[in-house]
Every structure is written in C-alpha cells, then in structure tokens.
Image (cartoon, rainbow, N blue to C red):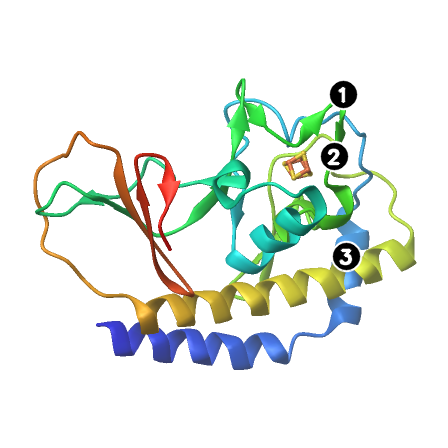
Amino acid sequence: MREDRIAGLKEAFLAAKKLSPTKLAARIQRIGFHCLKCGECCRGEDNSVVVFPLEIRRIQIATGLEWLDVVSPPNEGEWDKDGCFHTLEWRLKKEGGSCRFYQNGRCSVHRARPMLCSTYPFYLDRSELMCSECRGLGGRIESDEADRMAEQLIMRYLFEIQEAIALLERYRDFERGEAGKDGRYIVHDSEGEHRIVGGELLG
Ligand code: SF4
C-alpha cells in the first residue's frame, strides 16, 4: 500500500536525522578508503548512476546541455495499455559503455557530479553504512575527509528518502499493456510525470 510505504519512509527519515556524523565518520575511517582515480566506477557495464531532478539541473547549469543529453530512462519498467514505457528513475547517460561525463580519464562535471558519485563507494541503507565494490576500500582516509564523507552520506540519504516520498505521493498508477514500438516513455519522479516522445522531452 502506498500509504504504508510513505509512512515507512517518513519513519526512516526521522531515524536518519538522528544519525551521528561523528560515529559514521569513525566507521568510515575504520573501513578506510582512498580514491585511486582508476575511473572504474565511471566506466563499463556496471556504471549506472541514478540521479534526481535537482542533480540533473545542476549538471545542466554546469554544461549547458539539454535534459535528455544528461540523462535517459533506464530499461527497467513496464508498458501501459497505450504502448508507453513507464520507468521510475533517471540515469546518467552513457556513451560507449561509460558515463558520458567521463572524459580523458576524469569527470568533466566534477563540481556538479551527483551525490552518488561524490560519496562513492559508500551508501546508507536502513541507516546502515554499506560499501559498493571499489579497489580504493581499505586505503588511508584522513579524519577531515571521513567527516566530510559522513556528512555528505547523511545528506544524500535524507535527500533520497525525500525524493522517494515525493515520487510516491505524485505517482499515478496505469493500466498495463503490450510493448509499444514508437519510443514513448513516461518517467515518474519526485516532480510527477515526464513524457518523452520520439526522443523529445515534452514536460
Ligand atoms: S558523473 Fe563523473 S564521477 Fe559520476 S560516473 Fe560520471 S564521470 Fe564518474
């Protein structure tokens, strides 16, 4: 039930607000991390960066690119009865299997990069610290860097929960149907529905 999921997310938000950045930073220091600048998190099949509307706009401002030059809808979703493909999130666009912003061995939108990137390889799940695969784990991290990472992780987690609540509140269900062929998408996000027809964003 949508109401139950929203209530659960609101509880998670309150719990997340009580997280101690100091304790989290200490855990990050115990695990250890030093970015090797290998770019492995930006390249290859496993690279898949989920982004929210605010983050898309930040990259747009930094690059002057159109929305659909920054992101695309993922392949996971469902068809409606009119042959429109519905998805629930945006992902950074890829080129040649890598994030399109990974250029000449570096991130070309570093200052505007999404929170998922600036906190990689860490994330929070049910307020627990988790790690994605990364060769830099176990490396030496200075305490001020661990503090900064902990603060950003908590901010990211709170933001993700708020986005999920807004998505659920605005989500309108639809009648399922057969696969369509004319490239029509509806992306549901925290702002409601974005329609894409023939590669053009209609709103
Ligand atoms: S936005 Fe930058 S840091 Fe994030 S995956 Fe792309 S190139 Fe890597």
Q: Are marks 2 and 1 in contact (CB under 8 Å)?
A: yes
Can you identify the residue that label 1 sits on?
Answer: 104
State the SS at label 1.
loop
Q: Residue at x 49, y 71 (%)?
A: 162
Can you identify the residue that label 2 sits on?
Answer: 108
State the SS at label 3.
helix
| Quadrant (top left, top right, bottom left, bottom right) of the C terminus | bottom left
Left or right: 54 as drawn, with respect to 74:
right
The CA span between labels 1 and 3 is: 26 Å
| Quadrant (top left, top right, bottom left, bottom right) of the N terminus | bottom left
Between residue 124 and residue 174, name the one nearer to us. 174
Between residue 79 and residue 155, name the one nearer to us. 79
Upstream in the sequence, badge 1 or badge 3?
1
Left or right: 144 as drawn, with respect to 183:
right
Between residue 164 and residue 126, name the one nearer to us. 164
Local packing at callout 3 (Cα closer than 10 Å; few below 14, some 14-19, many 20+) is many
Left or right: 99 as drawn, with respect to 26:
left
Q: Is mark 2 within 8 Å of ligand 1?
A: yes
In the rendered image, residue 155, in percent from the top left (x then y), is placed at 66, 67
In the rendered image, residue 122, in percent from the top left (x then y), is placed at 65, 49
Q: Residue at x 91, y 59 (%)?
A: 144
Can you identify the residue that label 3 sits on?
Answer: 149
Q: Residue at x 52, y 56 (%)?
A: 52
Kind of residue at badge 2: Ser
Rendered position, 104 above or below 90: above
Upstream in the sequence, badge 2 or badge 3?
2
Q: Are marks 2 and 3 in contact (CB under 8 Å)?
A: no
Local packing at callout 1 (Cα closer than 10 Å; few below 14, some 14-19, many 20+) is few
Kind of residue at badge 1: Asn
Rendered position, 14 above or below 105: below
